[in-house]
Image (tube, helix red, strand yellow):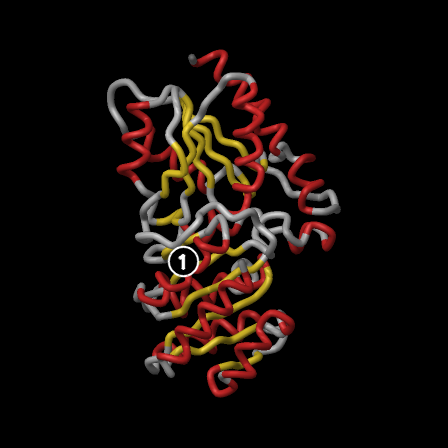
Amino acid sequence: MRDTFVKTLIDIAKKDRNVHLVTGDLGFGVLKPFWEQLPDQFTNAGIAEQNMIGFAAGMAMEGKTVFAYSIGNFSTLRALEQIRNDCAYHNADVKVVCVGGGFAYGALGMSHHATEDLSIMRALPDVTVLAPGDSIEAEWATKAIYECKGTCYLRLGRGGEKRIHDKTGNFQIGKAVKIKDGERIVIFSTGAIFDEVSRAFEILRKEEIDPALYTFPTVKPIDMQTIEECSRKFKLIVTVEEHNILGGFGSAVSEVVAELTGMKAKVLRIGLNDKYSSIVGSQKYLRDIYGMSAEKIAAKVFECQKDVL
């Protein structure tokens, strides 16, 4: 995803000299093509993410569209006051980019695990929040936030994610993308965890369970129409996110379902169960430990559907 982001941003920046990329002293292997081709549109702010966001806000106030890029929590939680007060409050054209959502930097420990970022960023008024599931969605999302005025948050995987889509399509901020139709159960996914969801789907098919699949590249504004339609059509909605289940994607879906009247689906949220990811290990290992591997997703769906269907 990050390579696709940089490639897409280069194409955008070559056409718009007001686009500027600022980084917090990282991503040199990935960002090198940008600064080599567009050195006057690139700034390394150093290991000073709060200053980086303040700097980005100042440039945005002078007419620039600024992409502020860093690892996981560094571009968000470390600089939260600056995002809130300097960017979002003033509707500044700053695009905060996190590379390595969830457990992507698993071996570096809890400080590098981005597991609260979606909930915190979606709580800020006037901030658009996107979490693409593959490289195609990352391309769509990068173009979309460039065109979207105001402060946006883009949460990327670290790279190597399974491709969901064969070609680009009609992408809209705030719209989910149907991957396949199914019966009785629908699985909603956001971000790079779709790798596990797609394998969980294959496991469930062997048990003669045929869920529908949707990916939600946009967490805020959430696609209320799709959620409502699925809540009427299916018995069980399953949300999967590489993130705390409190306040994040699953909560956004549940908020919509809770306000519906009449018959509606039960919601099963799969993610990190309100705890810090204190264990160190690879992303795949941590997903399994915390119940987000394909096998554990499938097992949770299988158990829950017995009580609902």
Classify residue 211 by image quadrant. top left
Residue 157: image location, x then y, percent: 56, 54
Horizontally, residue 87 falls left or right of residue 263, namely: right
Give the residue number, with chain letter if any, for mark 1: 141
Q: How many neighbours does mark 1 have within 10 angstroms: few (below 14), some (14-19), or many (20 or more)?
A: many
> In the picture shown, does residue 296 fall above or below 12?
above
Left or right of residue 282: residue 127: left
Q: Amino acid at mark 1?
A: Ala
Residue 130 coordinates in the image, percent (x, y)? 42, 53
Q: Residue at x 33, y 69 (%)?
A: 90
- Image quarter for residue 83? bottom left
> Which is nearer the eye, 258 or 5?
5
Identity of the residue furthest to the left in this view: 261
Taking the view exactly as shown, the residue that stands out farthest to the bottom is 40
SS class of the residue under badge 1? Answer: helix
Which residue is found at the position 51% from the left and 63% from the top?
Answer: 4
Left or right: 44 with respect to 153? Answer: right
Q: Position of residue 263 (x, y in %)?
A: 28, 18
The x, y position of residue 112, in whole percent, is 65, 55
Choose top left, top right, bottom left or bottom right for residue 203.
top right
Which of 130/276 is in front? Answer: 130
Marks counted in the figure total 1
Rendered residue at 42%/41% (across/down):
215
Residue at the image position 39 percent from the left and 20 percent from the top: 184
Rendered position, 8 above or below 257 = below
Quadrant that contains the C terminus: top left
Front position in the image: 126 or 140: 140
